[in-house]
Image (cartoon, grey):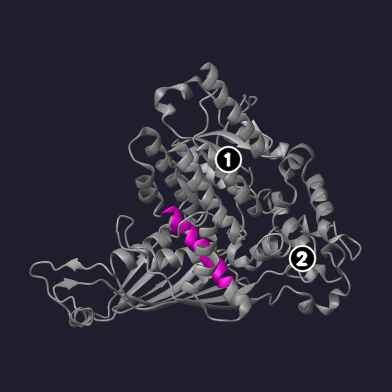
Amino acid sequence: MQLFRHTRPKGPTAVPTSSQKSCHLGAKPRILIIGAGYRGYSYAEPIHSSGEGIIAAVAEPSEFKRRAFGERFIWGTGKPLEGQAFTSWEDFISYEVNRRELERTTGTVTDPGIDAVFVCLLDELHATVVQAVAPLGLHILCEKPLATRLTDLLCIYGTLLKSWETLQTEAIFAAGLVLRHSLPQVMLRKLVREDRAVGDVISVEHTEAVGWKHFEHCYVRGPWRRESTSAPSLLTKSCHDIDFLFWLLCSPASTSSPEPPHLPSKVTSSGRLHFFRQANKPSGAGPATNCLSCPVETTCQYSAKSLYLHQHLRAGNRDRPVNAIVPDIEDVFRKQGLPSAAKRLLEVLGEDYDDETPASQVSRRNWYGRCVWESDNDVCDDQMVTIEWEDELLPFPQKQKSGSKRSSLLLKQQCYTGNLGTEPQYRPAKIAQFHMVALTDAISRRRGRISGTTGEIVYDAATIRVSDFCSGSEVVYNIPSAKGGHDGGDDGLALSFVRAVAKVKRGDMGVSEAQRTFLNCTVEELLRSHLAVFWVEEARIGGTALKWEEWWAREVETKLKGMGLGNF
């Protein structure tokens, strides 16, 4: 259960002081969090506790969430000042536009303003908010996925480029792809790409164990259960992992390298909704559609009453996932006690719908007490993806180093290309298999195997085992536990983003350098791995092997051209 539980730190709340106006603190990035939910807290906490940035404002429609977030990170036990709390992202933009106009026309500085924005709203709102914020020239970190539709991804790219051109300055742009900052994946990539611990990679088997409890909560009863109102589960859950595979196998070994990405050649994918559907409903459940009225509730693994009331609320946990069901559960418990909190939780779990309920009403909210075999979910609960790369000789040769030895393979390559006086860079064919599986005990854990020309790596979140074919030796790396979610990835991404913004704000680095140095990627890389998910999904739905070049030309290059943008 511990992996599913997320407890907000109970440290001291933020108390504004006059020292925050000092020159030293003035150099710290000032952050707006849009969306005071779980992801907003995940990013705000490391920034606040480290002192590397200032959580300066929050935009959140829920009064309870907005107040709790502000008391924790911004105004403490006092009241919010002007510019610290907004009921929506639209209100912030309106305020910021007016603030800038007042400062421009009168020289009046009402507050120091905002340097960067974290977009932590529902997935389907990401593209709209990013495109609205980008013209302000603020640095942006948007939670993954950047968008739920391919066209929206391209519109984000177009808006960023056009905004930067208009403003004559670029800004840091990041996505919530935390595996690039998760300790196991960072160590793994260093071993594979920088240290070449297994030589050239031939194949990768990578698995994300989603976890049955996590899947039922988020993808059967929760907000990401339907493709039409959200997106395929490969995008909403596992775009992390597709991005990791592209970072591992496609991106240059170093962000400073001029080497172009080794783009894949084709993909196949299979998957569907296997388990969480009516055909698998226990016969003893009869016509019941809600756990609280089900005759087999007390013995059912997926009993909402057991999962949320007994295993969490009565066990002392009032944070995630309980507060996703009743956002003010902490207030109810504190003011009225456990019996009232339990009653309130059961009231929400007992809410249900029937055949007479309009479909729009059903789809617009979550139904956490609904039978998992009677829900309106349709996203895959098990999916396999196979991505292939072809042999590639880079077009630009490198000068032969004096005294260096040439391998027979290299000589063959040089003879083949007719460049006997140079060293063409050779990138061999490889293949990657990814498995997203819901029915696991582990929750959001990664494991896998990498086969190379000189060795093999077997990994999970706790250890990385590197075997050397020639010597027969094995080196075991025990991965230290990391603070924060995703094995340190949440904290790592948040702080890396803030550090990049700080470098730019102080004038120590340009945007492009800070982006590569701290975020390990370019904007184009982030978009490419997101776009690849749509490539995979088209292959899965069509039941075919889909070539990258053909798909990219049709779905990306042509559409970018229609928007007046060049390819990347």
| Residue 249 versus residue 141 in the image, above or below | below
**Residue 266 image point, x, y percent:** 48, 77
Magenta stretch, main secondary structure, is: helix
The C terminus lies in which quarter of the figure?
A: bottom left
Do labels 1 and 2 touch, CB within 8 Å? Answer: no
Type of the residue with mark 1: Ile
- Element under label 1? strand
| Start-end of magenta stretch | 522-537
Left or right: 273 as drawn, with respect to 367: left
Q: Nearer the viewer, residue 380 or 79?
A: 380
Q: Nearer the viewer, residue 174 or 329?
A: 174
How busy is the neighbourhood of tag 1: few (under 14 within 10 Å), some, or many (20 plus)?
many
Which is more foreground, mark 1 or mark 2?
Answer: 1
Q: Residue at x 83, y 61 (%)?
A: 359
Per the image, the residue denoted by label 2 is 303
How busy is the neighbourhood of tag 2: few (under 14 within 10 Å), some, or many (20 plus)?
many
Type of the residue with mark 2: Ser
Q: Residue at x 88, y 64 (%)?
A: 293
When asked about the image quadrant of residue 381, the answer is bottom right
**Residue 352 image point, x, y percent:** 85, 59
Q: Nearer the viewer, residue 480 or 359?
A: 359
Count of marks placed on residues = 2
| Residue 187 versus residue 41 in the image, above or below | below
Is residue 149 visible in the rendered image? The answer is yes
Which residue is at the far left?
403
Per the image, the residue denoted by label 1 is 33
User: Is tag 1's residue or tag 2's residue first in the polypeptide sequence?
Assistant: 1
| Residue 439 versus residue 494 in the image, above or below | below
- Element under label 2? loop
The N terminus lies in which quarter of the figure?
A: bottom right
